[in-house]
Image (cartoon, rainbow, N blue to C red):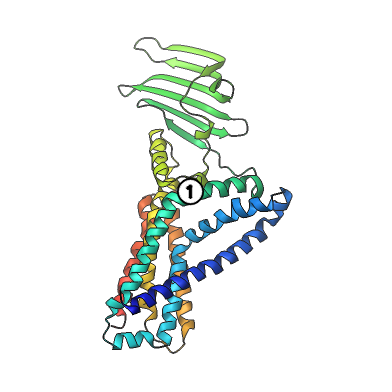
Amino acid sequence: MKVLDKYIIKQFLITFFFAVFLLSLIAIIIDITEKIDNFLENDAPLKTIIFDYYVNFVPWIVLLIAPLFVFISVVYFTARLTMNTEIICMLNGGMSFYRLIVPYLFTSILLALGIGYYAHNILPNQNTKRIAFEEVYATKKDNKTYSINYHFQISKDTFLYTQNYYEESKTGNKFTMETMKNGQIASRYEASSIQWDTSKLKWNMNNYSIRKIKEKDDELLEGSDTILSLPITPKDFIIQVYDMETMTTDKLKQFIHDQKVKGAENTKFYELERYRRSAVPFSVIILTLIGVALTTHKVRNGMGIYLVLGLLISGAFIIIQQFSGVFATKGNLDPMLGAWIPNFIFAIVALLLIYRAPK
């Protein structure tokens, strides 16, 4: 590795970690401003705030916008090299533009690998502590989304349905369970409501009817109250989207598989999170290439124009990322495409800028 490569790598990393440090301080100050009343109201211990919350909050916020940290760092220090004519001297000295981007590419790949590993394996464990702290000291108790029109498939031929579920009372309304045989309904359980029995760990069916379909006469049983054993618990009814942040990728994959087997309809949020954990690190490499290609042109207006362009591109990246995520979770877009579309678009932008960069 040449001296010039070491110099670029050093400047890249110094600027990146300085940006992380500075923006992390800003994020902490903003977060404290928003949550200080909750901390005081709930008597949150200072030691717990620091070590259980902010020690885990900083990695979360850093990885959330890590590609933008990298992009802004590349734009800033490369623009400085360009304005000092150092880039021009490198190119005039016989170095090709493609050789120039080698140390940038090397550093961005190292950062992408580190960010990816952290996001897949380490951050979920830290998020568990952060979210646990928020539930006790920093958020309202009513922070859960309740299931509406929820479907389960508990076996190959058995399907469940509830119209509503309420966590406080652990009660589901308008319950139906159907068992199929040879494509036809073999039995049908209905109840006006079901309620979880915390002592028996089973479900109480209220105002129920059990109909078994036979060739001649159906068998019907009705009553006001009975107990039913099901392979689901109240946790299966509550959709807590932030739970996915506490799962390592292996656990997240297994969770998605289990939810699909049960016939759950809320897996798109989890699938998008799974694919984003790989897409976001890859975007570090793409945005690095864009930053280099963008700032090797020397302009009359100085570094200001580079920073403005950098902010515009960062904003466009965030907007496209948000739109694709909404279409993936609320529309018909495949979650994998929703996670990777920003990378596809900006990869094309990177190639065009590299093609037009001074050689």
Pointer 1 residue: 124
The residue type indicated by label 1 comes to: Pro
Task: Using residue 132 as the reference point, say whether residue 156 is left or right of it.
Answer: left
Name the spot of residue 77 as percent of width and height, x first: 44, 78
Name the spot of residue 142 as percent of width and height, x first: 63, 43
Label 1 residue SS:
helix
Q: Is residue 106 above or below residue 147?
A: below
Name the spot of residue 358 as percent of width and height, x first: 31, 83
Name the spot of residue 260 as percent of width and height, x first: 39, 37
Q: Is residue 136 above or below residue 198?
A: below
Residue at (35%, 77%) from the top-left corner?
293
When asked about the image quadrant of residue 297, the answer is bottom left
Residue at (38%, 86%) from the top-left corner?
86
Q: Is residue 333 visible?
A: no
Q: Is residue 26 above or below residue 87?
A: above
When asked about the image quadrant of residue 265, the answer is top left
Residue at (47%, 83%) from the top-left corner?
303
Q: Nearer the viewer, residue 192 or 143?
A: 143
Dividing the image into 4 quarters, which one contains the C terminus? bottom left
